[in-house]
Image (spheres, helix red, strand yellow):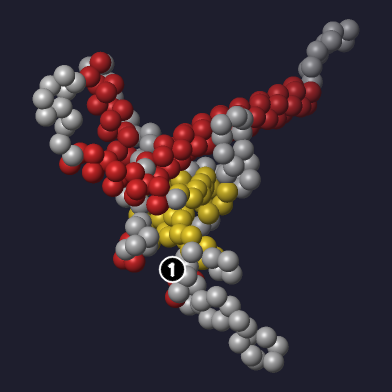
Amino acid sequence: MTRPGQSGFALIEVLIAVVIIGVALLALLQVRNQSIHQFLTIGDQHTASWLAELKMSELVSQDLPDPQDEETWEKFDSGDFGYLDKRANELNAAYNPDWVWRDEFAKFEFEWKKEVIFIGREFIGDQWDLEGWEPAVDESGETVDQEDPHENPAVRVVRVTLTVYLPEDNSRPAGASEGEGVRKVQIVNGRPAIQLVTYVDPSVLFVAEEAETEAAAAPPAPAPGTGG
């Protein structure tokens, strides 16, 4: 209560001011939390992109299916990148005695599949498509003249599909991408993920491996100027 001739704030005015300030602070806090979440999400996307590129390079360089060996026409596996945590922590601990073990990469999981794809003039598919192939029929029920892919599957390539899942708490919407070097995020099996698909000509790899084996088995050439 104020005396006559004096100015001041009534209790209701003070309460209104407190409410306005409180709402403003809550809005700022929400913006702050959203900014932190977005920063962490973008960081996860950058990490997932890097891990996907690293893993794909590994997959296409080793243990590809052999087109001549039917038992290897499809290979698949899954796991996480925890093995990179071990390397990173051991390296940092070697230079910093106070280093605390951190699990940064184990939260990123992956799945991959390597499969032989058959490509003919009238057929494209994997081994299951090849096994289930049947000649088409026309409207009258007559068999259409087609080349049987079992007899001549023509070109054989290896398709490598890699899916790197972002951490479970990553709620980035599908299709979003952030900045250069970050691949498009998709929803795979209900989870945000980065998926890479590439094709490899296995004949080139196997020919190269055979050439390396032959070179290793060959006797060393005599040095210039020496008798053989």
Position of 2 relative to 197 (above/below): above
Closest to the observer, 35 or 30: 35
Left/right of residue 45 with respect to residue 3 in the rendered view: left
Q: Residue furthest left?
A: 227
Q: Residue at x 62, y 83 (%)?
A: 144
Residue 56 visible in this rendered orientation of the protein: yes
Residue at the disc numbered 1: 127
Mark 1 Cα shell of 10 Å, populated few (<14), some (14-19), many (≥20): some
Closest to the observer, 114 or 68: 68
Closest to the observer, 138 or 112: 138
Image quarter (top left, top right, bottom left or bottom right) of the C terminus: top left
Q: Residue at x 56, y 31 (%)?
A: 181
Q: Residue furthest right?
A: 5
Position of 168 relative to 29 (above/below): below
Residue 135 in percent (x, y) is at: 56, 81
Position of 113 relative to 131 (above/below): above
Residue 42 visible in this rendered orientation of the protein: no
Residue 133 in percent (x, y) is at: 51, 77
Left/right of residue 124 with respect to residue 158 in the rendered view: right
Task: Give the amino acid at mark 1.
Answer: Gln
Which element is circle 1 on?
helix
Residue 184 in percent (x, y) is at: 59, 42
Residue 61 in percent (x, y) is at: 37, 43
Count of marks overlaid on the render: 1
Closest to the observer, 160 or 195: 160
Q: Residue at x 34, y 62 (%)?
A: 68
Left/right of residue 85 with respect to residue 193 in the rendered view: left
Find residue 22 and report its image quarter.
Answer: top right
Image quarter (top left, top right, bottom left or bottom right) of the N terminus: top right
Q: Residue furthest top?
A: 5
